[in-house]
Amino acid sequence: MKSDIFRNTRSAGVLAGLLSVSLLLGCSSQRSEQSELLRKGHQFYDAYLDGDVTRARQSLEQASQLFESPHADILEPIGHAGILYFNYARLYALENRVGDEAAAEKALIKARFWNLRRYELAGDATNSARMDEWRVFGTTEKVVEVADKLDNAASKGKGPKYIQGLQKR
């Protein structure tokens, strides 16, 4: 009887250990997939910062496709929504600067959607003060300001190169 209890306890311990290792490896694998996805997204962002208007636009559109794909569901939801908000804010700023009103409007709508999604996921959609903040961050001026601040921080104050090309025209 003692050996049966020992064997059952030992089996339970082995199973618990295997389950723990499996969970750790699964979490590690998911973190690895998340890191790879974010690395790819960062490559698009670098190309956006360094590209002319055409390349910058293409990079933002590719990043949108990447982060709106089902594969991106492995990301933490609030952060995922934030990535898409910032990406569409950049695309709005670009399209607005080049004068493509239809493309700018489409990007603005998507930026506002993803910004609202961030607030909903954070549980702030019922907080009137936070919703006032959301409304401010959905204005055209604030969307451009957010994009510019992020881009200037990432480029040591230079901003995306496409802007310099537009200023030379």
Image (spheres, rainbow, N blue to C red):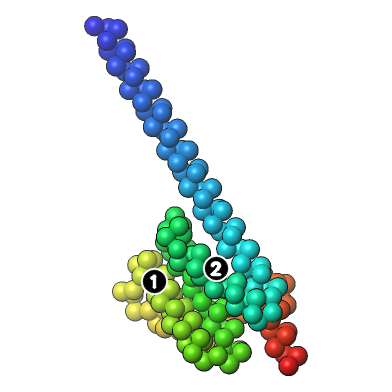
Q: Characterize the local packing of mark 2: few (<14), some (14-19) or many (20 or more) Cα atoms within 10 angstroms.
A: many
Q: Which residue is mark 2?
A: 63
- Looking at the rendered structure, the kind of residue marked 2 is Ala
Q: Is residue 76 visible?
A: no
The N terminus sits in image quarter: top left
Q: Is residue 145 left or right of residue 17?
A: right
Q: Which amino acid, by three-letter code, is at mark 1?
A: Arg
Q: Which mark is residue 117?
A: 1
Q: Nearer the viewer, residue 155 or 52?
A: 52
Q: Quadrant of the C terminus?
A: bottom right
Relative placement, left or right, of 12 versus 1 is right
Q: Give the spatial CA distance, label 1 vs label 2.
A: 18 Å
Does label 1 or label 2 sit earlier along the sequence?
2
Can you say whether 84 is above or below 32 in the image? below
Question: Would you place residue 27 above or below residue 152 in this image?
Answer: above
Q: Residue at position x 70%, y 73% from top?
A: 50
The answer to whether 128 is drawn above or below residue 83 in the figure is below
22 in relation to 134, above or below: above
User: Which numbered dot is residue 74?
Assistant: none
Judged from this view, the residue extending furthest toward the left is 1
Q: Residues within 10 Å of mark 1 (few under 14, many from 20)?
A: many
Q: Horizontal and vertical percent for residue 111? A: 47, 78
Q: Quadrant of residue 46?
A: bottom right
Q: For the point 49% across and 65% down, which residue is it?
A: 67
Identify the residue at image location x=55%, y=53%: 35
Left or right, residue 61 beside residue 125: right
Residue 163, how many percent across, how many down? 68, 84
Count of labels in the image? 2
For discs 1 and 2, the disc positioned in front in the rendered view: 2
Tell me the SS state at disc 2: helix
Residue 86: where, in percent of width, then height?
53, 73
